[in-house]
Amino acid sequence: MFPLLSASITISLAVAGYWLLKKINFPAPSIMGPMMFIGIYQALGGGLPDLSMTTVNIFQLIIGLSLGARINHQRLADLRRVLRPSLVIAVWTLLSTLGMTFLLLQFTPNIATALFSAAPGGISEMTVVALAYDTEVPMVSTYQFVRLVVIISVVPIIARWLKRRTPTAQRVAMKEEQNQTLVTGDAEPIEQVEIGLGTKLLLYSLGIMGGLLLLVLGFPGGGVIGAMTTLALTNIVLKKQYQFPSSVLQLALLGIGMSIGLEFSPEVVRTIQEMLLPIIGFSLLIVLSNFVVGWYLHHLTHWDIITCLLSSAPGGLNQMLAVSEEMKADTLTISILQLVRLLIIITCIPIIAVMFI
């Protein structure tokens, strides 16, 4: 197939998949749309070529920059105020990942596939890191997707039910105590100043250099970790706060979805079919463990149960924040604890992978 024709087919399928899934409010349409449409085409014998590793590395750098842009001096100050819950989330994230990896190894001999499938880091984050390893990436993305769907479907329903069972006076008292936890501390009020385009480009350039350095050194997941860490440290030192361009992130997510879809083949589809029941079963097991941790946070902090459940839910960061907004939960607390979980996964899992693979 001619390169121009194959590129046109790939891009057309990606855009069509994204448009359709976004239209029906499907979870993570930027990744799942291209993955599904291109994956089906490949499974039917499409024969489209894989993306080059250079292209995948560019997507890694963009994902890393988007994560690093979320970390700044204010987030660091907020983290100190919820230190105990953050430690609980960090420990649970690592232990549950290792436990689920051991269980998944009963069904797949590939340690990297089991590890990245078990890690609750979100579809985009885990698949982009898994691309740098000898993993069955479609299997990883399928595990991540099914878990996300189960969590988004089940956790809000249970949270609403528990909220209705909690007396109103008790909910008000918990809310006041939670607000007190987040507003007290030694941090001084921070004036947020809009920074110029030139400053942003300089910050992004530093992040890209950090990512490229780790890629050259062969560091696990170097593109994501290097860009994220460099940009985050720069933000903290220079006390900068800003939003990463959503359009750029959107293109990177579409690219990741394309790269996953291109990994599909008839053999991969047969493997996924054989693993479907274990995938669903492990997803439900993760949700049950989420409830245990949520209840523990509830008793540890006396926060409302919805905030605790959504803070510990191993779904995607953006998806959990969207659910928290809809359910009128404490979005600030949830964003901090979800970010802790994501950072633990992104920084620790690649290192663990090197130790065991």
Image: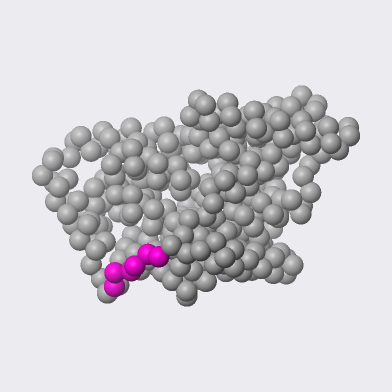
Magenta-drawn segment: 188-193
The C terminus appears in which quarter of the rendering? Answer: bottom right
Image check: 159 left or right of 4?
Answer: left
Image check: 173 left or right of 105?
Answer: left
Residue 45 lies, with reference to residue 163, above or below; the image says above
Image check: 298 left or right of 267?
Answer: left
Residue 81 lies, with reference to residue 12, above or below; the image says below
Residue 66 lies, with reference to residue 124, above or below; the image says below
The image quadrant that residue 229 belongs to is bottom right
The image quadrant that residue 157 belongs to is top left
Residue occupying the far right of the picture:
2
Between 315 and 72, the one nearer to me in the picture? 72
Does residue 294 appear anywhere in the picture?
no
Q: Residue at x 33, y 54 (%)?
A: 332
Q: Residue at x 19, y 36 (%)?
A: 165
The image quadrant that residue 159 belongs to is top left
Q: Position of residue 321 (x, y in %)?
A: 40, 45
Between 179 and 193, the one nearer to me in the picture? 193
